Amino acid sequence: MKTIHLLLLVLVLTACGSHSRQSSQEQKPRQTTFVFPEIPEMLTEPEQRLSFLIQHYWEEFDFADTTLLAQPDIAEQGFVNFIALFPQAVPEDLTAGLDSLVRRAEPHL
């Protein structure tokens, strides 16, 4: 009888230990702010940097993660910051940036 209880205890502890390892590996850190694309260092002119930023602005945003859309500090503020770049941008970059936004968001609508 003691052997059965000991065996059950070992099985339960093993099952609990493997669950905690698995869940810790699967969890990603929770995103709390909008992640901007990293502008290459070789782009030194402000116009070049702005062009790159607008065209690649949405690359780090995961449109499939609906929890991000419900967080104003991430999705809403990211969109507001994107719009704030418009007055300084040339029309071609705006078109490319908006196309990128629509292309990335469309599959998740």
Image (cartoon, rainbow, N blue to C red):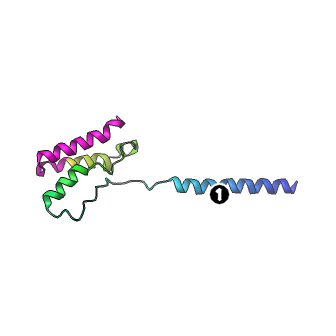
- The secondary structure that most of the magenta stretch takes on is helix
Please report the residue visible at 21 percent of the width from the left and 50 percent of the height from the top.
54
Direction right: furthest residue: 1
Residue 64 appears at what percent x and percent y? Answer: 39, 42
Direction front: furthest residue: 42
SS at mark 1? helix
19 or 54, nearer to the observer:
54
Left or right: 49, with 72 as reference point: left
> Compared with residue 38, is residue 82 higher up or lower down, i.e. above or below?
above
Left or right: 7, with 95 as reference point: right
Residue 24 appears at what percent x and percent y? Answer: 54, 56
Residue 90 appears at what percent x and percent y? Answer: 11, 48
Q: Please state the extent of the stretch shown in magenta in the rendering.
A: 83-109
- Looking at numbered disc 1 in the image, what kind of residue is underneath it? Gly
Name the residue beneath numbered marker 1: 17
Crowdedness near tag 1: few (<14), some (14–19) or many (≥20) residues, C-alpha within 10 Å: few
Disc tally is 1
Question: In the image, is residue 85 part of the stretch drawn in magenta?
Answer: yes
24 or 5, nearer to the observer:
24
108 or 67, nearer to the observer:
108
Question: In the image, is residue 51 part of the stretch drawn in magenta?
Answer: no
Please report the residue visible at 64 percent of the width from the left and 55 percent of the height from the top.
18
Left or right: 40, with 91 as reference point: right
- Quadrant into which the C terminus falls: top left
Residue 40 appears at what percent x and percent y? Answer: 25, 62
Q: Quadrant of residue 95?
A: top left
